[in-house]
Amino acid sequence: MGTTSVKAGQILSSLIVLLGSVFLCPDSCVAGDFEDYSKQEASKVMKLIEQIQREQAEGLSGGSRRAVVTESELNAYFAYRIEAEHSEVMKELRVKIFEKNRIEGKIFIDLTGQDLPKILRPEMNFYLDGTIEVKDGLARLNLKSLYLENQKIQPEILNLVIYVGSKSQNMEPFRLDDWFELPYGIKNITSEKGSAIFHY
C-alpha cells in the first residue's frame, strides 16, 4: 500500500480527499447560496487541533481520547483555511457527514489562467459521495460517485484537476485513491450523522 506524506502545506489538500465536499445531489446546489463562515466555529476546530498536539507532545496516556467536530464547525474551518492560505485553486469546500464514515460534498475549483486540457474548464463544481477508510494510521477516500456540475464523471477527471492545481502551486500531486498519513497524531476517524469523531 503506497502512502502520501502530509506536510504542513498539504494538510488542507489531504482533508479535501478525506472529508470531501456538500449537497445530497448535484441538482440541490444553488450557486452562491451559502453564508459567510463562522470564525467562532473555525476557532473551535483550531483549539481542538492545538489540544491534540499539546497532549501528544506531553505524552499524556490513559487510553484512547476523542474529539468531536460538527459538520458546521468543519465547514467553517475549511473556509477559514481557504481564506487564510489565499488558495488560488480551491475556492470552496463543503462537507456533509453521515454515519459509517460516509460523506458527500462539494468542491469549487478555479483554474483561471492555467494552461488547461480541453476537457477542463477554468471554473468547476465537483460533487462527490464516498466513505473514508482508515487503516494503520492512514486514510483514503473510497469514492462511490463523482459529478462535474450535473454530469457523472470518472475519478480520472478530478485526478487531472488535482495534478494541474498542484503543479500550479508547486505542490506534489496526489490521486483520489492515495493513502494519507493522519495528521496531529490522530489514529482513527469515525462518524455519526452531522459529526466527525477523531480518535487519538
Image (tube, rainbow, N blue to C red):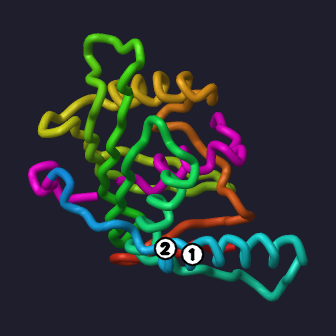
Question: Who's the residue at 19% across and 60% down the image?
Answer: 33
Q: Which mark is residue 26?
A: none
Q: Which residues are magenta?
A: 1-30
Establish if 143 lies above or below 152. Answer: below
In this view, which residue lies farthest toward the bottom? 62
* Badge 1 amino acid: Ser
- Mark pair 1, 2: CA separation: 6 Å
Q: Which residue is mark 2?
A: 39
Q: Is residue 62 magenta?
A: no
Label 1 packing within 10 angstroms: few (<14), some (14-19), many (20+):
some
Q: Quadrant of residue 115?
A: top left
Q: Position of residue 149 (x, y in %)?
A: 17, 38
* Badge 2 amino acid: Lys
In the foreground, 93 or 36: 36
Q: Which residue is mark 1?
A: 43
Quadrant occupied by the N terminus: top right
Question: Who's the residue at 69% across and 73% down the image?
Answer: 200
Q: Secondary structure at mark 2?
A: helix
